[in-house]
Amino acid sequence: MQIEKYSMGIGDRFAHQGKAQLQAMIQAQAAGATVAPVWNKSHREHTIIHTAPASVRAEADAAVKALGWKEAYHVDADHIGLKNVDLFLDASDFFTLDVADFTGQAAGEDDIRAFVEKYSKYAGELAVPGIDETFHVTKNRIEDIAAKYLLAVREAGKIYRHVEGKKGKGNFITEVSMDETDNPQTPEEMFFILAAVADEGIPAQTIAPKFTGRFNKGVDYVGDVAQFAKEFQQDIAVIAFAIREFGLPANLKLSVHSGSDKFSIYGPIREAIRKFGAGLHLKTAGTTWLEELIGLAEAGGQGLAIAKDVYAAALGRFDELCGPYATVIDIDRNKLPSAEIVAGWGGQDYAAALRHDQACDAYNPNFRQLLHVGYKVAAEMGERYLDALKEFEEVIAKNVTENILERHLKRIFL
Ligand SMILES: [Zn+2]
């Protein structure tokens, strides 16, 4: 099983928007870009919402059937490790092996020494086709990289072999993710990480490094766009080189996690994948749920009441809700409107504050981020929330499709 050149990870916390999401892919295809949808939901999301991976498979299959999608689609076991991978085996055909917790833990000395010996042929001035400058690589540098990442890649190998043992070789797509680490990986580090991935026999088709800059959930990129653009191109060149040097799958491509809403880097990403003819997996941050809130607010009546209740409750439980996401959100509490102010808003006021339209003065990224992590509140509403999704399906679906198509697919792939 091979991942298509272009793919997009679409989360759907409450599993009601599969069709609206797929509709965006259908419209993108009609406009000239085929992007494979990959429904992803992490163990963390399943735990908070009390759902099981089978529900994601059911949703994906139903949406594909209902809309007659003839292209590929996948179901991603997002950020899994040995502790929870078994829950995802039946439902998923895409496995994101998360080894972030193991980066920085040193492998055994013999392991490191053997790795350095094997790859010391790259010491010196390392020239990578497609990159103007050379990387100055020393044996010490290779040793540092091995000490930092070798154990993590070994761990990925254990998870990979476990999945392979259950599903059979070639029957699923493998991604290796390191994005939830403290420090970004440089293109040079990525080269040696890919060497280790090949040594482990992991047929990775996508790799998700941590890029330079901040990738907060649901909001724009914060960082040095020029530096990002340079490293992103270098990463693509390094991957192409590593495929040849280490015999990795020919379709190995970058995966950008928390990739939704990073509007200021979409230009450089678009340019880079065109320049190198590279593929891309863009994994979004579960922001479809925010489009549900926007749709509910626009619907007015009970819909707006629910949207306001979610905000009021989220504000009151700020620390609890933000805690698990502390490293991937930046909320200025002083810029959050009070529950009383929001109670007086009309549906359009709520929608304008939440919708990610940077040209709109009313857009409030603090409000947006708090609601983004507030899905637990909606989950606790149970039937009240789910019934509203059905009742106001039309206005919600319009927002879900438009967000994926206009603000994402069109800006990168078309
Ligand atoms: Zn991630």
Image (cartoon, helix red, strand yellow):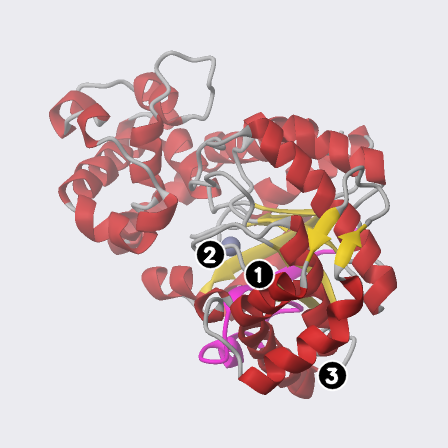
Q: Is residue 84 magenta?
A: yes
Question: Over which residues does the magenta segment extend?
Answer: 70-94
- Image quarter of residue 48: bottom left
Q: Secondary structure at mark 2?
A: loop
Beta carbon of the mark 2 residue lies under 8 A of ligand 1: yes
Q: Please, what secondary structure does the residue beneath circle 1 have?
A: strand
Measured in 3D between alpha carbons, the distance from the residue under mark 3 to the one under mark 1, in whole angstroms, is: 21 Å
Mark 3: secondary structure = loop
Quadrant into which the N terminus falls: bottom right
Answer with mark 3 or mark 1, whichever residue precedes in sequence: 3
Task: Please state which amino acid type lies under the numbered disc 1.
Answer: Ser
Asked if the residue at tag 2 contacts the one at tag 1, i.e. Cβ–Cβ closer than 8 Å, the answer is: yes
Mark number for residue 287? none
Q: Which residue is mark 3?
A: 168
> Which is nearer the N-term, disc 3 or disc 2?
3
Near mark 2 (Cα within 10 A), the count class, few <14, some 14-19 or many ≥20, is some
Measure the C-alpha gap from mark 1 to mark 2. 8 Å
